């Protein structure tokens, strides 16, 4: 019981690491690369100014694999963009929606 409570508190205090750990597990199970760190994820979100890479809305981002894990895309910094839940859900394992280029400011 104490262990469960301690785990809950840690997950609440470290949401970015929880997201990365979840993707590590998915990548490991699929047998693809998984080198993304929590600090890289935070840097990617900062580069997109906390906005969805596809629609540009400022919401709590989810980790989106540009090339899906099911198609061999790994959890590596160059394959990850922040996406809002609706954009990430619409994509499934197909091609991503047309991105808004927030990083370059275009």
Image (cartoon, helix red, strand yellow):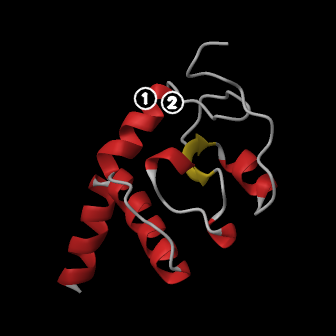
Quadrant (top left/top right/bottom left/bottom right) for the N terminus: bottom left
Q: Is residue 45 left or right of residue 94?
A: left
CA distance for labels 2 and 1: 6 Å
Q: Which residue is mark 1?
A: 46
- Local SS, label 2: loop
| Picture quadrant where residue 43 is located | top left
Q: Residue at x 66, y 62 (%)?
A: 68
Q: Is residue 11 left or right of residue 79?
A: left
Q: Is 61 placed above or below 63 here?
A: above
Quadrant (top left/top right/bottom left/bottom right) for the C terminus: top right
Q: Is residue 14 left or right of residue 26?
A: left
Of 3 and 105, nearer the camera is: 105
| Mark 1 residue crowding within 10 angstroms, few (<14) / some (14–19) / many (20+) | few
Q: Is 42 placed above or below 101 here?
A: below
Q: Residue at x 29, y 54 (%)?
A: 14
Q: Residue at x 30, y 44 (%)?
A: 39
Q: Is residue 25 left or right of residue 58?
A: left
| Circles 2 and 1: CB atoms closer than 8 Å | yes
* Residue 40: x %, y % from top left: 35, 43
- Local SS, label 1: helix
* Mark sitting on residue 50: 2
Of 2 and 95, nearer the camera is: 95
| Mark 2 residue crowding within 10 angstroms, few (<14) / some (14–19) / many (20+) | many
């Amino acid at each position: 019981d104490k262990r469960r409570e301690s785990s809950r508190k840690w997950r609440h205090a470290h949401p970015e690491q929880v997201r990365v750990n979840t993707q590590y597990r998915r990548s490991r199970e699929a047998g693809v690369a998984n080198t993304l760190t929590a600090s890289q994820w935070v840097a990617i979100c900062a580069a997109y100014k906390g906005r969805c890479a596809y629609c540009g809305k400022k919401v709590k981002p989810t980790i989106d694999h540009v090339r899906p894990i099911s198609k061999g895309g790994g959890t590596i910094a160059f394959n990850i963009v922040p996406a809002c839940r609706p954009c990430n859900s619409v994509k499934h394992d197909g091609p991503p929606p047309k991105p808004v280029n927030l990083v370059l400011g275009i």
